[in-house]
Amino acid sequence: MKLTARVKPISYLTSHAAEVAKEIADSREPMVFTQDGEAKLVVMDVATYEEQQETMALLKILALGSQEIEEGDFRSDEAVFAELDKDDDE
C-alpha cells in the first residue's frame, strides 16, 4: 500500500465525504488529507483501526514479556508445569 497514491486535499474530503467513506471502507486502505500542502489527517475504516489497535495491544504484551525475561522475572517451564500438576492432584 502506497499512501502517496492516496493523498488528497482536505477540501476534497469536505466536498466528497460519502464517496471517500465508501472508497476507504471498500479498499480498507487509509487515505491522507493535506491542508496548506502538509499532511494533516489519515482516515481509515473502523475495522482496520480496530485490527491495528489489537495488534498494538499484542505487541505491547510481547514487549512487556521480553522486558520481564531480560530482568529475570520469570519461572522455568518445569516450575510452571509442576505447579499445574500439583493443582490437578488437589
Image (cartoon, grey):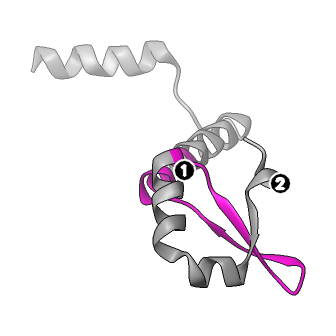
SS label for mark 1: helix
Identity, as a three-letter code, of the amino acid under mark 1? Gln
Q: Is residue 48 above or below residue 12?
A: above
Identity, as a three-letter code, of the amino acid under mark 2? Thr
x 90%, y 80%: residue: 37
* Residue 36 on the magenta span: yes
Residue 86 in the figure: left or right of residue 76: left
x 22%, y 18%: residue: 86
Give how far apart the Cα atoms at labels 1 and 2 are: 20 Å
In percent of width and height, residue 65 lies at 59, 39
Closer to us: 52 or 75: 52
Is the residue marked by circle 1 packed among few (<14), some (14-19), or many (20+) residues within 10 Å? few
Closer to us: 6 or 60: 6
Look at the image and give the residue range highlighted in magenta. 27-56
Is the residue marked by circle 2 packed among few (<14), some (14-19), or many (20+) residues within 10 Å? few
Residue 51 in the figure: left or right of residue 89: right
Q: Which residue is mark 1?
A: 52
Quadrant holding the C terminus: top left
In percent of width and height, residue 50 lies at 44, 54
Q: Which residue is mark 2?
A: 4
In percent of width and height, residue 23 lies at 52, 56
Closer to us: 66 or 79: 66
Q: Is residue 40 above or below residue 42?
A: below
